[in-house]
Image (spheres, rainbow, N blue to C red):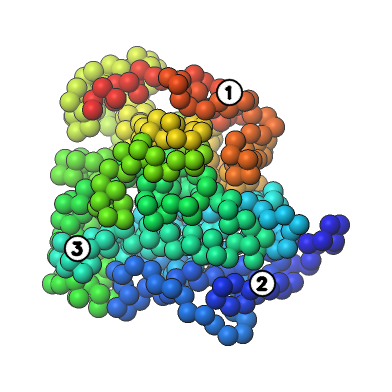
Amino acid sequence: MAPNAPAPHDGTPIEVDTTHGRVRGAWHHGVARFAGLPFAAPPVGELRFRPPQPVEAWDGVREALEFAPICPQNPSMMDALFGGEAEVWDEDCLYLNVWTDDVRPTELRPVMVWIHGGGFEMGSGSSPLYHGEAFARSGVVLVTLNYRLGALGFLELGGLDPAYAGSGNLGLLDQVAALEWVRSNAAAFGGDPDDVTIFGESAGGMSVSLLMAMPRARGLFHRAIAQSGAAAAGRDPADARADATAFLAEAGLDSVQDAVDADVTTLLAAHARMSAARMADPEAAVRAHGNPLAFLPFRPVADGGEVPADPLAAIAGGAAAGVALVTGTTLEEWKLFALMAPPVTDEAALLDRLALLCDRPAEALAAYRAELPDASLSDLECAVLTDVVFRVPASDLADAHAPHAPVHQYRWDWSSPVGGGMIGASHAIEIPFVFDLVEDQRLHVFVGPEAPKPLARAVHEAWVTFATTGTPAADGLPDWPTVGGGRRPVLSLDVVPALLEDPRAGTLRFWSEQR
């Protein structure tokens, strides 16, 4: 908009030209939103289990007023917890959304591309949790995207048919295709294609980290924020191939072509049964697959092709040199997952669970009790799994990348009062603050009606400032030094933010010695 121009009325149309044709969005509360823009061809029919293909151009003006269908997925309790009803899904799902407050600014704006979480099996870019009005008002062009999930995005079929090698990473290739679309089209929406920050949480944070390691993604982004997810998410190829064989058997399918031809509901039902079996006995799943993330049957594959065989080593070798990074975790990540599993009830059971994760379970328990002397058994279990699945991988990522670019590390400490502390400082709790949405009543079931607005403003501003300058900073936050040189300064994000020097270093050191 021109300086001092009146804000358009809600619903006022706005049109821009993309590389594939003209699109029509609309203004909402002073922000232009373009919803449901295709960035790849529909991955249906014979394109199921195939890499994303280019979009065909269209004549005339394509309406971009409503969100597009999301990737097929099974119902989840997270739909209600994270602010809304289940969205309509369809296998034709490769769409993205753009929020901007000016398509013709005097100077192009930074672009931020959000990659949603959901364990690589649920979620969407159009969830109310990720609406981008606040980012647009802060001078950023915000892009959210869908990518293929579950079997459609991460079923490695190359062991059954070499022609489908690499199908275990299609979800990541969808993300690359969306970033290529951003590079070609950001300027049409007022964004700078040479100033792109990718950010995501959980599976989205894991995706961000893996994109940092992927040669095909090099140059498509310039800064990165990995929230509660790091490069340790990649599956062993042999394990992924075994999972594919088990999946086809579960679905009653005899060949890859059968899977290509099957109704998508057949694939979803088989996925649900596999997940239920692993959730019913998570210890057996960890024992069988050697990974605490084994309860997720579909994740990216460290196949040595699109994804390096050792993504962390690739990052340590400079795969994303020059890409400034913010990474961190929440204090009590595992509390969210503990809502879905029975807690440990005695010390012997806790030691048995620790034995699945390390060779010295008694020493691990002693290390945690030394740092958390007042913790209950369930709190100790939460601390251990928070560290093994999230904090240790995030710290490893920070250490690997620090020689190659500035790295800032945080810990989210604010605790939600919902459920009498049942949620606490759990996994995903920071997202409404990052998007400055804590006043959205739909999210009060997660953060409560009294979530601290100054913290939301500060965190949102820090993310925007990082995308703009490469350094996270905001009013209300202390100076935030980088990781490196033998130091690990970690910013505690709470009602009163504070800088901590290598918090809980003893337990972090314990896991380092386990390698």
Residue 68 is situated, as x and y percent measured from the top left of the image, at 51, 70
Q: Residues within 10 Å of mark 1 (few under 14, many from 20)?
A: some
Task: Specify the amino acid type for callout 1.
Answer: Ala
How would you rate the neighbour count of disc 2 (Cα within 10 Å): few for under 14, some for 14-19, many for 20 or more? Answer: some
Residue 25: name its quadrant: bottom right
Which of the two residues, 418 or 431, is positioned nearer the viewer here? 431
Q: Most extreme residue toward the bottom, as rendered? A: 59
Kindly report the distance in space between the C-alpha atoms of the residues bearing marks 2 and 1. 44 Å
Q: Earlier in the sequence, mark 1 or mark 3?
A: 3
Q: Position of residue 152 (x, y in %)?
A: 32, 65
Quadrant in which the C terminus appears: top left
Q: Is residue 284 above or below residue 22?
A: above
Q: Which residue is mark 3?
A: 158
Residue to which mark 1 is pinned:
498
Q: Amino acid at mark 2?
A: Val
Residue shown at the point (33%, 62%) measured from the top left: 170
Pointer 3 local density, CA inside 10 Å: few below 14, some 14–19, many at least 20: some
> Which of 160/365 is in front?
160
SS at badge 3: loop
Is residue 389 shown above or below 432?
above
In this figure, what is the number of numbered marks?
3
Mark 2 vs mark 3, CA separation in Å = 41 Å
Residue ID at (25%, 47%) = 309
Q: Earlier in the sequence, mark 2 or mark 1?
A: 2
Q: Which mark is residue 16?
A: 2
Mark 2 or mark 1: which is in front?
Answer: 2
